Image (spheres, grey):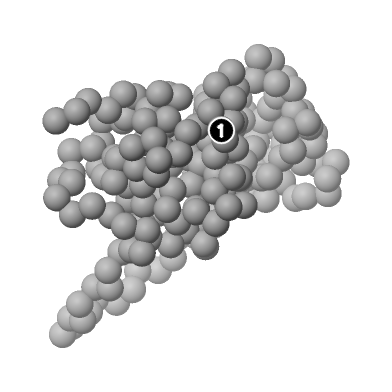
Amino acid sequence: MSTRIGVSDDDAASEDNPVTSEEVSVSNIAFGALLEALLDAFRSWDALQSMLRLQLDKHLEHLSSRHKPLPDVVHDLIDNAEAAGWKDDLLAAALRANPGNAKLRALAPTPSAPAVASPLPAASPSPPAPPMDRNALLDHLLSLNEAQFDVLCARLNVPHSILPGSSSPLATRAVELLRYHEQSGRSLQTLQHALQPAHPR
């Protein structure tokens, strides 16, 4: 069995039933969710490049620059897949390369559950989290790591030109993100909603 470089440790699931693009559709999956899953499953340029080359016969260097931070590389990869119409193939290929990754599998459609004679009553939805003020949101932003912060920016569709580069301190980037969000007329609750899945549990 060949070794896959940089693939996360979740790939204990069997590969006896490879995933095909016909079984996977990501048309309704948020850009940020796919970006977050790919970053979790392939944690280096080499791992991402190996998956693309072996599964899709594509070259990562034709789609992005090796000198960019990995979140930007994955961003470019998804942009290219969307533009060229092979986004479904990308998720299917990622699942074949790392079938045990929980975040990738969460994006794949699940088969319908069989009907049961006496279904349990549906659980009541959890109440929404109370709104945070500006200082609380800033504290949450400062608790993120670099990869989580980049995923959050992708969820919010923040233009790359708005924020300082990844070499800048996270505190500087967090303050600028909060300022951009306020100046663009969005509510703080929108930022809070996007922050929830990116924040470490």
Task: Residue at 33%, 73% (x, y): give it.
Answer: 122
| Quadrant into which the C terminus falls | top left
- State whether residue 109 appears in this view: no
Q: Pointer 1: what residue?
A: 62
Quarter-of-image position of residue 175: top right
Task: Residue at 75%, 28% (x, y): give it.
Answer: 163
Where residue 14 sits: x, y (%)? 15, 46
Residue furthest toward the bottom?
117
Residue furthest toward the front?
57
- Above or below: residue 147 compared with residue 27: above
- 67 or 130: which is nearer to us? 67
Q: In the rendered picture of this protein, how many numbered marks are placed on residues? A: 1
Where residue 110 sits: x, y (%)? 30, 64
Secondary structure at badge 1 equals: helix
Where residue 42 sits: x, y (%)? 39, 32
- State whether residue 25 appears in this view: yes
Where residue 3 sits: x, y (%)? 22, 25
Side (left or right) of 32 relative to 5? right
- Above or below: residue 13 compared with residue 142: below
| Quadrant into which the N terminus falls | top left
Side (left or right) of 9 relative to 82? left
- 70 or 129: which is nearer to us? 70
- Above or below: residue 193 compared with residue 142: below
